[in-house]
Amino acid sequence: MTYFIVQSLNGLFSAALLFLIASGLTLAFGVMRIVNIAHGSFYMLGVYVAYSVAARTSSLLAGALLAVLIVGAVGFLMQRLFLRRFASQPLPQMMMTMGFALFFRDAALMIWGGDPFTLATPRWLAGSMETGAIVFPWYRLFVIAVAALVGVGLWLINERTLIGARVRATVDDPEIAAATGINVTRLSGGVFAVGAALAAFGGVMGGPILGGYAGMDFDLLPLAFVVVIVGGMGSLKGALIGAIVVGMIDNFGKALVPELSYFTLFAPMVLMLALKPTGFYGRA
Amino acid sequence: MAGRNVSRPWRLPLVILLASFLLVGPPFLSAYWVGLLTQVVILGILAMSLDLLIGYTGLPSLGHAGFFGVAAYGVGVLSTTYHAGLWTSVAGGFAIGTGLAALFGLIVSHVRDVYFLMITMALGMVLWGLSFRWIPVTGGDNGISGIPRLETLLGLPASGPIPYYYVALAVFVLCSALMTMLVKSPFGLTLQGIREHEPRMRSLGFNTWLHGYVSYVCAGAFASIAGIMWAYYNGFVSPTYLDLTASSELFLMVTLGGPATLVGPVIGAGAIVILKNVISAYTARWLLILGIVYIVTILWAPQGLWNLGRERRS
């Protein structure tokens, strides 16, 4: 039982990170119909920027803030200068992001080197919670709570504000949305930048546990894709459900049958595709 | 967008020039360049096989290197762990690559566009993960080395770079002929119809699912052939054969060269192989440059080099 609870909490921790990362991916997909291969790169850049900042200021908070700002700006510029030319052309957009993914991957290797590292856990979150036989690190609980807060924030913005209404309208039908006077281009830039910032934030939050290493961008990308496919592309709720499903399965899979971890991970995706190709909350 | 090359008189002379170079050039070149040309023709087969999907069927696969890699692993495992002979290994590699395509095809061929892209990518990552983690069979990160070189083939001596090059060239010619026949056949024309307007093809009575499926399996089969040739060329198999970088490099070969032309992807493969080796001699920053090549291609030659001079599709 203890084992089960601890593994579930670990699963929730993975789900929290996956939600932070996949929510940006799914929103960008919903608004721009873009498959962003560079999304894993945003996550990677987030960790590396935070690493550089934390090395100078020894503050994870400062690292997180700067990572979010810088990577958000990178995302904004990428959309503004490159992707915007290929609006509603999914294939050229995808290939463009693939070019950026390779570029960022090698640039990170050039700037930061290939040595793996972890970010320092903030001192006030060190140690573990101990309740009876259950021992669980405070930091992981903190990440779960932060992701939940971000989720609530995103949900409020999406459901209760004018911007959120515009985003939802664009996800439903970009052409009609544009016809009603929504500036889809500007909205796309904003959503893409926020998505990049969220991925970077996810990277920083995972930094003290998963750290940074060469190749982390392409390690994470398929996970984020599975979340989005299972949850349904363009849906925040779907990203949440997908993240929990994938986080849990990935964790229990890795714990129980480590050799088959990739299979246990992709099995739900295959099942989902066979039964409901648009995912839990996606639209055709 | 089926390419009639009336407006591009440079195409035919260029093909003749390149073909005659591939045929008579190698004996005059150094072993290094013969090796590169061998890579070009093998990856040319692979790029053409992906073109069947991307260019002709309109299915953007981002996991295509998977079949290439699995077939190469098949050859590697059979010929080292089980000491199987040449033809057993070749048949085994082909069977496992094609069989896998037949299996994956069941999963992927009822989705289209970006869904197809994401799913093939995810499946490609499964294969990569397997090659990386299933250490008892695949050797993990170290891969499998010591695949025996080709010594004789059909009673003829085939060892050394130049004979192997000609073996690869023969396979390349055979595969290109088969693929050309495929895309010109009624089946191939149906595929192009599906690419242009699937609902219309369906309402005309075509089983579009089956066409997509068969196209996917054929592409997997040709990719497997390329994988087998590559395993014998390198004598070594490792997870880098089927990772996402490999699949995206492959994707770039097709889009850089020009999709739905078959010739274009071969040119793309040649450009990438030569660029990669020339650049790698000067700098370790190959991926950085590849990324830039990607971006520049999309910006200035979105239809690929072989289609230059054609107005852009709206």
Image: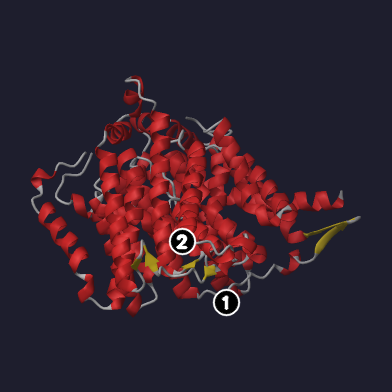
- Residue where numbered disc 1 is placed: A56
Frontmost residue, B141 versus A188: B141
For numbered disc 1, what is the local secondary structure?
helix
User: Residue drawn 35% across and 69% down?
Assistant: B158
Q: Position of residue B44 (x, y in %)?
A: 31, 57
Query: Local crowd at mark 2 within 10 Å, few (<14), some, or many (≥20)?
Result: some
Residue B121 visible (yes or no): no
Disc 2 marks a residue whose amino acid type is Leu
For numbered disc 2, what is the local secondary structure?
helix
The numbered mark 2 sits on a residue in which chain?
B
Residue that lies at the very extreme toward the front in this rendered image:
B155
Tell me: residue A5, above or below residue A215.
Answer: above
Is residue A183 found left or right of B241 in the rendered image? left
Q: Position of residue B273 (x, y in %)?
A: 32, 66
Label 2, label 1: how far apart the Cα atoms are:
59 Å
Disc 1 marks a residue whose amino acid type is Arg
Is residue B249 found left or right of A7 in the rendered image? left
User: Residue drawn 57% across and 57% down?
Assistant: B129
Query: Local crowd at mark 1 within 10 Å, few (<14), some, or many (≥20)?
Result: few
Frontmost residue, A81 versus B140: B140
Q: How is the image coloured?
A: secondary structure
Disc 2 and disc 1 in contact, CB within 8 angstroms: no
Residue B249 visible (yes or no): yes
Is residue A146 found left or right of A22 in the rendered image? right
Q: Position of residue A140 (x, y in %)?
A: 72, 57
- Residue where numbered disc 2 is placed: B86
User: Residue drawn 28% across and 65% down?
Assistant: B166
Disc sitting over residue B301 in the figure: none
Tell me: residue B226, above or below residue B6.
Answer: below
